[in-house]
Every structure is written in structure tokens, then in C-alpha cells.
Image: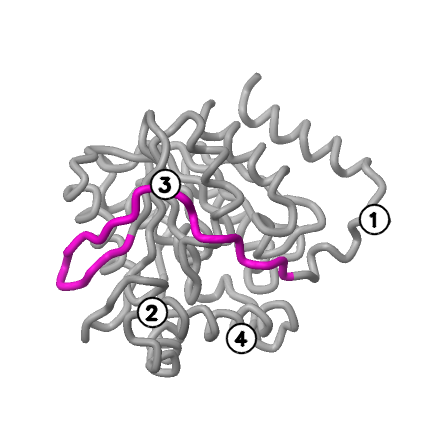
Amino acid sequence: MDRRLFLATTLFTLARIPHATAAERWQTLPATPAPIAGRSARAEVDGISLFHVETGEGSPVVFLHGGLSNSDYFGLQVPEVARRHRVICVDSRGHGRSTRNTQPFGYDLMTDDVVALLDHLQIPRAAIVGWSDGAIIGLDMAMRHPDRVSRVFAFGANTQTSGLKPDIDKNPTFAQFIARARTEYERLSPTPGEYDQFLQQIEKMWETQPNWTDEQLRAIRAPVLIADGQHDEGIKREHTEYMAATIPGAGLLILPNASHFAFLQDPALFNAALLDFLES
């Protein structure tokens, strides 16, 4: 079935399902999954130590998590994808178990880290599954390193700072996530006492990046699916629709009764959409 038709049919069917039992699911923040089982290693790239986990066999798929979090957040997706693919799940620089240096955080820098990791693993080209900052990195790779990207599943991304809702940190669910992120950083990071400095650096990046033009987005040639939750706490719906309309051939998927954390709130639906996109 054509991918666009499949997604449209899925959304139509879901729209008819009574919402009484799941109306508040999008307001919850389910527990972070257990660490991903697999072959864990570190790659010394770009002056940092980049932690990653590998599992499965087949065509490569790289999972990139959102800002302040870590690779554990994809624990409900990786086992499903690893049934058919070689999965590489990465802790971005300064996040989770990876280190950072004195360079200011930037999406181009973190994208270059991922490309360097692919070089280290001798992977010429991979599909990218990204959430939030990870989705932005995936789109950046598609623009700046098109030969290294086979397709991009971009969930909860923005391509301009104007695409963010104001006062995201005051949303109860997002505030809960930030508090959790501190605890996880202190438990996992090689620099456990530096969360405040880390948060300040990430927030500085969020205030100024990304700011890509229509021309840059139209240069993307890889298949892209722009996805988001119906109740995303931080991304404006009109911005999500703008990205899908501007990137050539991009699909658009809005997951009902879910938010910026849909992969935790409704992993069955999230995984079905992801697997369909990867296999199409």
C-alpha cells in the first residue's frame, strides 16, 4: 500500500476509536525504559567519547534521542526495529553516558558527531530515527550529508525557533521531564555534578537554533516522514505541517492522544508507523 495512503487510513481509523479510556494519556510521562540490551561501546570522535549500543542485523538504522535525555528512551522501539535492522542507538554529546568538551552545543556539531560515528563503524549510509533534537539532527544530516542518509523519521522536530511554543518548561509534563532528566544525568553522566551548566548550554542552543530556510529544506532528497503527537507540548502544529509541506515528498503523521513523548505513551502505534516507514 502507498505510504501516504496507509498513514491517512491509519489516522482516519484511529479518529473513530472512542477516546474515553485514553483521553489523558498525552498528559502522562511513562517511565523511562530500561537500558537497551546490546553491544555497548564508545567511539572517540570530534574530541569526545560517544556512547552507543548496537543490536540486530540488516540495513543500519540510527536512533537519536531528544535534548536532555539519553538512548534509553527508545527502549520500546529498538527491539522491534532490531528484528530486521542493525540498530545503533546513540547518546548524543554531553547526554547520557557520552562526554562533551568546551565547544558550544550546536546541531551541526552534533550532526558531525553522528557522521564521525558512522565512519568509525564503517557504515556508509543509514536511516535516521530522531526524536526532537535527534530529529533535527536527522534533517541536518539529510541537508549537509545527503549521501550518508537513506531516510529520516523525524518526530517532534522544529526547523526554526519560531516553531516552538512559548513557556514550554511551564507545561506540567515537560517540567516533569526536565526534572527526570536531571536525575538521569546525575546517574549516567561522566560529569554528574554539571547538570546545571549542561542545561544552560542546551537552552542557549534552543534559543538560537535551528533557523533553516525554505530553500535549505527543499534541498532534502531523502524520504522523510514528519511526525508528531496531537498534543505536543512544545511544537506548534502549524510548524509541523509547514515542514511536511516544504520538504519535497515528505509525509505527515499526527499521532492521536499523544504528545512529544508519544513513543512512551503509545509505543504500539508509534512502532507501527515507524516500521511501515522504514520498510516502505
Residue identifier under label 2: 189
Query: In the rendering, at what x and y percent does residue 147 appear?
Result: 22, 35
Kindly state the secondary structure of the residue where label 4 is placed: helix
Question: Decide: marks 4, 3 in contact (CB < 8 A)?
Answer: no
Residue identifier under label 3: 128
Instruction: Residue at 56%, 37% (x, y): give it.
Output: 271
Question: Decide: marks 2, 1 in contact (CB < 8 A)?
Answer: no
Query: In the rendering, at what x and y percent does residue 228 appear?
Result: 57, 49
Q: Give the mark nearest the N terminus, 3 or 1.
A: 1
Q: Is residue 211 magenta?
A: no
Which amino acid type is marked by label 4?
Ala
Identify the disc placed on residue 141.
none
Query: In the rendering, at what x and y percent does residue 104 appear?
Result: 24, 73
- Dot in front, 3 or 1: 1
Which amino acid type is marked by label 3?
Ile
Q: Is residue 31 magenta?
A: yes
How far, Cα to Cα, is label 3 from label 1? Answer: 33 Å
Q: Give the mark nearest the N terminus, 3 or 2.
A: 3
Q: Is residue 215 shown to the viewer in this render?
A: no
Q: Give the mark nearest the N terminus, 2 or 4.
A: 4
How far, Cα to Cα, is label 1 from label 4? Answer: 27 Å
Which amino acid type is marked by label 2?
Ser
Residue identifier under label 1: 21
Q: How crowded is mark 3: few (under 14 residues within 10 Å), some or many (20 or more)?
A: many
Q: Give the mark nearest the N terminus, 2 or 1.
A: 1
- Dot in front, 2 or 4: 2
Residue identifier under label 4: 179
Up the image or down, 204 lies above or below 47; here it is below
What span is in magenta?
29-51
Kindly state the secondary structure of the residue where label 3 is placed: strand
- Dot in front, 3 or 2: 2
